Amino acid sequence: MTAPELSTGAQAAISKVPLVFRAIQKLMDDPYCKKTNPSGIINAGIAANITIQSLLLERLNSISEEFIASDLEYNTPYGSAALRTEIANIFDRHFAPVTAVSPEDIVVTNGCTGAIEMLTFAICNPGDHVLIPAPCYLALEGDMGSRAQGVVTPVQLPLEDSMDVRQIEYFEKAIADIKAEGKEAKMMFLMSPHNPLGASYPKKVLQAFLKFASKHNLYAVVDEIYALSVFDRSEAVAPFESVLSWTDLDAYIDPASVIVLHGLSKDFGLNGFRMGWALSPWNKNIINVLRCYSPFGYRPAYTDRIITKFLADREYIDSMLQISQRMLANNYQIITEFLNQHAIRYIPCTAGHFVWLQLPISACTKMLRARGEISAAEANSVKWTKENEVMVWDDLVDKYRVYIPTGQSFFSAEPGWFRLTFSIGKGELQVGLDRLLEACSS
């Protein structure tokens, strides 16, 4: 006797388990601790703001409360009115919206993962394409494809064009290829500040993206999850400007086609609370359908209540964000000094928790020689490939005990790139950098 087959969708999901999960499981099973497990794996891969962890724990412990009767009941699946009011105040204080954000235009979800999946269900039919500039956030393929069956289509382009309007040429080709196959694209997904490049798009680039989306009748989802983690505001860099702040948004796209995402995980250092939110002041249909889907992403009533209280202390929140930005800037300085000292190529960043870097080819030759796959004479001819990138990545985790995700997970066109998270404790950061250096030393 055999069990009936799973659905084709389930079988497809199983076949596309993200590459990084292999390493993340090892990390979870054997995490580094200076006192209890100094040989454990350093987590320099998951984007979590550990720099403010003690500050958050102190505050959350001070406002935690006993359970009350309403905590045992169903809460509002798309967020209580009180919670959405505090989220609206975050937007009003920090995103400079043209008009004050209404709590009625916000849907609270089970992390931004939940919001992304629900939006894919709402916008795409199974098999419809979602255009995303590559490299891009590694979980999007699962968020949009595992259940909603959207087809994530990373648009490959040279790194030097990643913050330039020239990349629209690559998007035009990508959508032409999709149409030539008799398929449809329904959505463009953008992250500003960018993951993994750690920079805000210049406004002229976002304008070009929105014009493109309008031309091809696409929804534009703008994920601003790192908006409050901008640590370099110098005049030399493109500032973060939320699309909510544009007085002329309708000159580039019908605002009803734009949805903004934000949440607790990154700017507030609260990954584990699993709370994100979607906002569209311009499209009630989108908000209503997300409300319809929201019972599939309930959060505990107690969580909503505590986070409402947490966000309501506006003086604390604004101070905490300033501290966070200073600490991110300090850690970024540590890591860039290290990378410059050792001539490791990287993309300068201004926001977020990580830096996009290319390990020196010595990491690859050292790994291949240790495995007996090349001779000393062949070392000078080694080049990065997708295959040896993964082998180096395996060595980083298993041998050198440091986890950073491989560029392939981000759909990087060029092999040898990795994303290194620097928003961890300074001690762990230094240990992680020392281990990376050992992996690269000849």
Image: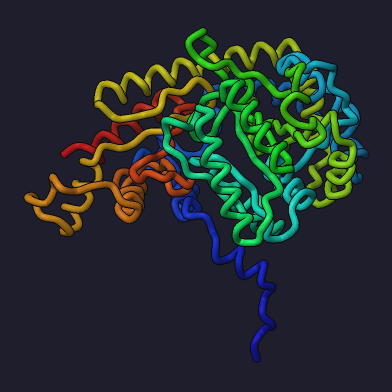
Q: How many marks?
A: 0
Q: Is residue 231 above or below residue 256?
A: above
Does 376 sit left or right of 57 as displayed? left
Where residue 97 appears, x then y in whole percent?
A: 77, 17
Residue at horizontal 51%, vertical 9%?
Answer: 234
Residue at horizontal 77%, vertical 41%?
Answer: 109
Towards the viewer: 414 or 11: 414
Quadrant in the rendering for residue 269 = top right
Residue at horizontal 63%, vertical 55%?
Answer: 179
Q: Is residue 266 visible?
A: no
Towards the viewer: 217 or 433: 217
Q: How is the image coloured?
A: rainbow
Does 235 sit left or right of 207 as displayed? left
Quadrant in the rendering for residue 372 = bottom left
Quadrant in the rendering for residue 380 = top left
Q: Is residue 227 above or below residue 297?
A: above
Where residue 309 appears, x then y in whole percent?
A: 80, 23
The N terminus appears in which quarter of the rendering?
A: bottom right
Towards the viewer: 381 or 103: 381
Does 37 sit left or right of 125 as displayed? left
Residue furthest to the top = 235
Where residue 63 appears, x then y in whole percent?
A: 76, 23
The C terminus appears in which quarter of the rendering?
A: top left
Where residue 244 appears, x then y in whole percent?
A: 75, 22
Q: Is residue 132 visible?
A: yes
Towards the viewer: 297 or 36: 297
Residue furthest to the bottom = 1
Residue at horizontal 65%, vertical 19%?
Answer: 241
